[in-house]
Amino acid sequence: MEMKNTTSCFLAAPTQRVTREQISESRLRLEQEFLQLIHAETPLLWKGSVTDLMELVYLVYVNGNFRDADGYPLSMAELTRRACTALCMPVPDNPYALAARAMNRKGLKRQPLLDRYAWLYCVAGVEHPLERIIKHVGTAERREA
């Protein structure tokens, strides 16, 4: 039996690991994509899990680079509210618990969002990995969500 050679970014480098430098670079890139996400002019829908979204919000919150008009870092609650509003989602009851659960994920089947993002960005060469879990929608679809 002859096997076809399938070249996919997911099969290209299964043993290649992401370095600490690449994780740091990916964290900054993820923050930039988050900024674009909460300031998007077109309606968006989050296709990922709420846990992944809360991990994303927490990563942005911990860096403290998003500030209010007085220069204070935005709270986790405010970042959560903005992200959920931009993505047509209800605000979860306990975003901290979801973020903590996400950060403690282990194993190959469900890695933290940052690890998956870093692999897609640095190893697989995906320019905007966050776009894979965001859907741009029209106004009518947004009302239905």
Image: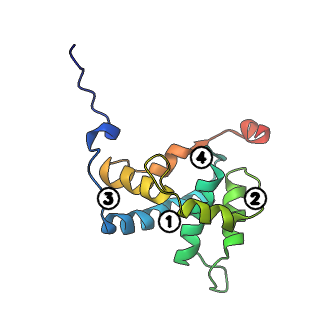
Answer whether labels 1 and 4 touch (C-beta < 8 Å): no
Q: Which residue is mark 1?
A: 31
Q: Can residue 39 be seen in this snapshot?
A: no
Q: CA distance from mark 4 to mark 3?
A: 22 Å
Q: Helix, strand, or loop for circle 4?
A: loop
Callout in the foreground (1, 4): 4
Nearest to the observer: residue 95 or residue 36: 95
Q: Which residue is mark 2?
A: 91
Q: CA distance from mark 2 to mark 1?
A: 20 Å
Point out residue 38 in the picture as x, y percentages from the top left corner. 62, 60
Given the image, on which type of amino acid does mark 1 rest? Glu
Callout in the foreground (3, 1): 3
Q: CA distance from mark 3 to mark 2?
A: 32 Å
Q: Helix, strand, or loop for circle 2?
A: loop
Point out residue 26 in the picture as x, y percentages from the top left corner. 40, 62
Q: Is residue 38 left or right of residue 12?
A: right
Point out the tag, 2 or 4, that comes first from the N-terminus: 4
Q: Which residue is mark 4?
A: 48
Q: Can residue 106 be seen in this snapshot?
A: yes
Q: Which residue is mark 3?
A: 18
Q: Quadrant of residue 13?
A: top left
Point out the tag, 1 or 4, that comes first from the N-terminus: 1
The crowding category of the residue bearing disc 2, from other C-alpha atoms within 10 Å (few below 14, some 14 to 19, many at least 20), is some
Given the image, on which type of amino acid does mark 3 rest? Val
Q: Quadrant of residue 92?
A: bottom right
Point out the tag, 4 or 3, that comes first from the N-terminus: 3
Q: CA distance from mark 2 to mark 4?
A: 15 Å
